[in-house]
Amino acid sequence: MSRLRESGPLIEYVDERLAAGDPIGVTSASLLEVAYGFRRAADAGDPGFHKLLQWLKRFVREGRVELLPLDHHAAIVAGEVRARNPSPPSPRHGRRRRSEAELRAAWILDIQVAATAWTSGRDIATADAEHFEAIAAAIAELAPRGPELLVFSPPV
């Protein structure tokens, strides 16, 4: 979602899936994270991100993706995963550029994203699979007879 722009192969893929009647699902927590990042960049003085945020609002309003809400099922799953995994796994590739507080907030949002995708019967496409693989394993422990939450690289 964070790599989505007005033009390019990713938006073409999204629109092709919509035209085929199989829209891309975007969790409300994913949309929150992207809007947060775009707004922070815009407020830091990058006017391109202000324009991108306005485009994102129109894009979602137009229904070009299916927005997946954090409903009560997903909230309960997310709460159980968070209770068993209160902190994110240590980064494999050294310290990231975020503060400890930002890492913990991102972890909670990642849990919400994964729980929403899983309860909606969707898989997760992400360029940063580390957290989502850990969350998928935690969900599998909670629901060993449930469907597997698959985590894979974006198709484009």
Image (spheres, rainbow, N blue to C red):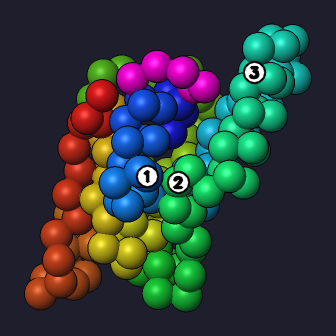
The span shown in magenta is 5-9
In whole angstroms, how far apart are the C-alphas of marks 3 and 1? 25 Å
Asked whether the residues under the numbered discs 1 and 2 touch, taking CB atoms below 8 Å apart as contact, a structural biologist would say yes
- Return the residue at label 3: 49
The residue depicted at 75 percent of the width and 21 percent of the height is: 49
Quadrant (top left, top right, bottom left, bottom right) of the C terminus = top left
Residue 51 location in percent, x, y? 80, 23
**Taking the image as drawn, is residue 96 in sight?**
yes
On the image, which quarter does residue 154 sit in? Answer: top left
> Residue shown at 37%/36% (left/top)?
13
The residue to which callout 2 is attached is 65
Q: Which mark, by number, is residue 117?
A: none
Question: Whole-percent x and y of residue 140?
Answer: 19, 73
For the point 73% across and 26% down, the residue is 52
Q: CA distance from mark 1 to mark 2?
A: 7 Å
Which of label 3 and label 1 is nearer to you?
Answer: 1
Q: Nearer the viewer, mark 3 or mark 2?
A: 2
Q: Secondary structure at mark 2?
A: loop
Q: Circle 1 sits on which residue?
A: 18
The secondary structure making up most of the magenta span is: loop
User: Which kind of residue does numbered mark 3 sit on?
Assistant: Phe
Measuring from the top left, give residue 7's x and y in whole percent: 54, 21
Nearest to N terminus: mark 1 or mark 2? 1
Type of amino acid at the residue the image marks with label 1: Leu
Q: Nearer the viewer, mark 1 or mark 2?
A: 1
Q: Is residue 78 above or below residue 76?
A: above
